[in-house]
Image (cartoon, helix red, strand yellow):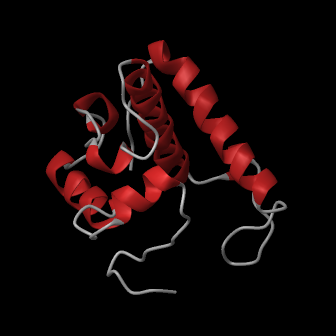
Amino acid sequence: MTVLISTENAAELRRARDLYATYCASSGGINHQGLPCPAWDELPESVRIHWYTVALRVTQLAVGLDVALHVGDEAEVEPSESVTAHLRDRAAAIAVWRRYSGIGIEGLADEMRRGVARFVSPTGAKP
């Protein structure tokens, strides 16, 4: 997947790398397969683009927090076009986001507001 990312978004690229580094720090440098996390420059381009998309979403939510979005409301705020514009199929990406975000899972938003930790799979099955 080749995506053109404007040099105007250098700060978002840096944020993406920082978010990846934070993931690595929180996992002890071990990925979901139990293997060492590769260095940022060793990640496939497609994976770096996924982290870039995460960074754009973090920015959207941070700006939203400044305009009365409360922590826990993230699942109610669809990723904006600025977050998904570089993706091949925005509608498909939003459909996947909805499936994984917890929208439609009764009580999830209330639990998030109360700070109750619960992990929910995309199918709604409990771990």
Residue 96, image quadrant: bottom left
Residue 86 coordinates in the image, percent (x, y)? 30, 36
Residue 108 coordinates in the image, percent (x, y)? 36, 64
Residue found 45% across the figure and 56% down from its top: 112
Q: From this viewpoint, which residue is outermost toward the front?
A: 114
Residue found 42% across the figure and 37% down from its top: 57
Residue 88 coordinates in the image, percent (x, y)? 24, 47
Residue 105, image quadrant: bottom left
**How many numbered discs sit on the rendered protein?**
0
Q: Nearer the viewer, residue 98 or 65?
A: 65
Q: From this viewpoint, which residue is outermost toward the right?
A: 28
Q: Nearer the viewer, residue 8 or 56?
A: 56
Work out whether 11 lies above or below 54. Answer: above
Residue found 43% across the figure and 26% down from its top: 65
Work out whether 126 lies above or below 4. Answer: below
Q: From this viewpoint, which residue is outermost toward the top?
A: 8
Residue 87, image quadrant: top left
Residue 36 coordinates in the image, percent (x, y)? 81, 66
Q: Is residue 64 left or right of residue 76?
A: right
Q: Is residue 54 left or right of residue 33?
A: left
Residue found 71% across the figure and 68% down from its top: 31
Work out whether 23 lies above or below 81. Answer: below
Q: Is residue 43 left or right of residue 75?
A: right
